[in-house]
Image (tube, rainbow, N blue to C red):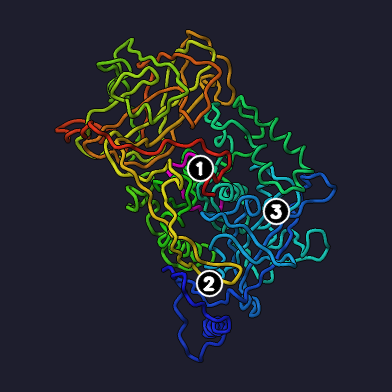
Amino acid sequence: MPIRARRTLMPSRALAIAAAAALMPALFPSPGAQAAPPARESTPVYSYADAVRESVWVDTGLDGDRDGRTDRVAVDIVRPREAAQRGRKVPVIMDASPYYSCCGRGNESQKKTYDANGDPVGFPLYYDNYFVPRGYAYAAVDLAGTNRSDGCDDVGGRSDVQSAKAVVDWLNGRARGYTTRTGTARARATGWSTGDTGMIGKSWDGTVANGVAATGVEGLKTVVPIGAISSWYDYYFARGAPLYDSGPDRLADLVNSPDARARCGHVQRRLADGAPRTGDWTPLWEERNHVKDAHKVKASVFVVHGQQDLNVRAKHFGQWWDALARHGVERRIWLSQTGHVDPFDFRRAEWVRTLHRWFDHYLLGHDNGVDREPVAAVERAPDRWTTDRAWPPRATATTTLRPGTGTAPGVGTLGVAPARPGATETFTDDPGLGELDWAAEVDTSNPAKAGFVTRPLSRDLRLAGSSTVTVTATPTTTSAHLTAVLVDLGPDTIRDYGAPGEGITTLTERTCWGASTTGDSACYKETAARTTDVAFTVLSRGWADLGTWADERRGRPLTPGRAHTIRVDLAATDHVVPAGHRLALIIGGTDRYLIDPPATQPTLTLDLTRTSARLPLVGGTPAFLRATSGTAHPAAPRSAPPAGVTAPRPAATIPGGSTR
């Protein structure tokens, strides 16, 4: 449970005595005493105030900045002093980040702080405050080129991954560490660390955790990626369609230290040259694709993602989860209604409790049952969660739905029956409109979209997993971008993911999660769900450059007047369309704020007989048929619709956005 901000801290001597008392039965068992039952939960028996705080520089074996010596990355560590004094080794929780000096971490943008001697004082986030008293070490790693590390940040490439992997190797005695950035005095972790490591982090930090796990490094026992990237190409492009107007070189310039900026121009050039704005897949993207290496993952994986994350979009968790599943990786997932938000800020008490048990099991070996709990937790409405033993649920089956023409242009039907031969719909790309505009006018003719809608449902219909839409379109110009979205048409109250906070409101009251010192508080501002009433909900989206129709890794000019068939991958989702609502598939061109427009403004004619959607429906086709037959619930009233979700703001090109 949280401790209110006025909490009085236990004196360090009392904590030390408590720690000793906790160890006494194991160290000096009484004659004839029965063995104590296995521990099920770590408790705060160590002094946070007296903890060892130190900095170590670990050799990565790379020379990214070309200065003639291998790069060393800075690792700031806090660990229980009493455990070291008694020869007890502890596991390590690690957050490797590029943000510790440039941008900060968490909802309050905390940065690392140091004393006059350069020794670490303040560690961002609560992991150190909460877990160090419970018998863990915490390590905050500066990626190469950032803060106090050598080298150059290469935005998800070999240097990023090696920055953290080398630290795991050092914790296990396989890499060299030093007490200073340039000196020769060695620092060793094998005297105090078990080598067992858990990596955690949001956004870029979680992406590094995915990358290190995908190396299969020994000693990494679990990773907790929160809103994390699984393939850097998919952060910048969606099958050739640009999601941002810049590339990874801009990110490197943001996070690199002043020294690194001065010496890393060659890396900047390599990033710019290797990530052309054409959207073509290059060797640079292949190096930064962790999905292809999911078979190497040995650690358990606890995925957390906002289903309305428009920064690190939901495709990332879907393809990573599916790849891990194919290779039998032990895993768990939380899916919220938020945007790019940490679970500490949308489900705080339950998150801390769950994470505590997760690390206790995978790093301390406690048999606490966390590995036997439901695999998935999904936020159905603000602060209302459900669970599943498997995800997607075992009853989920791919169902093919097909569009058909309706009573007016651009207003069609959606069902299992194929369209009549020769059926078409036509729209013209309008870069000034997007998914919210299309959905608001789904039942009216709009020249910028083609909409296809089921009848009102007679029972709930659940989608769980990733969808694809196959589109056959004939363009009038040599370039075209496509958007496909799935929409729940009906009133609801949801988190306002497009507003500042992306679904949360930050309050003034603070609660404390662990022990504090003068330089490092465990107390954080509370949050509450920021909600809005809507007339519809966009539940999944996907984009593509039609020029990649023949080769998804390379675009080419289109032939005007010729039909081209392409698959659009939609983001993974878990959403229940309630009885009385309708499910819609909308196909349009440029999705305002979410993709950049093509070089031309095409009109596209859809061949409906060769256009379809494959959706992961719980219960499969029979569930869809049951939901769209029988007596339908009354359709939602159409007069005076709610204002709806805030229009998505153009996302900053930084995996962390406004709530890093």
Residue 628: percent from the left, percent from the top?
Answer: 22, 31
Magenta includes 298? Answer: yes
Q: CA distance from mark 2 to mark 1?
A: 35 Å
Instruction: Mark 2 or mark 3: name the one nearer the start of the chain.
Output: 3
Please name which of the two marks, 3 or 1, marks the residue nearer to the observer: 3
Crowdedness of circle 3 by 10 Å Cα count: few (<14), some, many (20+)? many
| Residue at 66%, 34% in the rendered image | 284
Q: Secondary structure at mark 2?
A: loop
Q: Secondary structure at mark 3?
A: loop
Q: Please give the range of residues in magenta.
A: 297-310
Q: Label for residue 147?
A: 3
Q: Is residue 618 visible?
A: no
Magenta includes 503? Answer: no
Q: Nearer the viewer, residue 363 or 295?
A: 363
Q: Amino acid at mark 2?
A: Ala
| Residue at 52%, 80% in the rendered image | 10
Residue 414: percent from the left, percent from the top?
Answer: 29, 25
Quadrant where the N terminus is found in the figure: bottom left
Q: Secondary structure at mark 1?
A: helix
Q: Which residue carries the number 1 mark?
A: 320
Residue positioned most to the right: 68
Q: CA distance from mark 3 to mark 1?
A: 30 Å
Crowdedness of circle 2 by 10 Å Cα count: few (<14), some, many (20+)? many
Q: Nearer the viewer, residue 510 or 291?
A: 510
Q: Amino acid at mark 3?
A: Asn
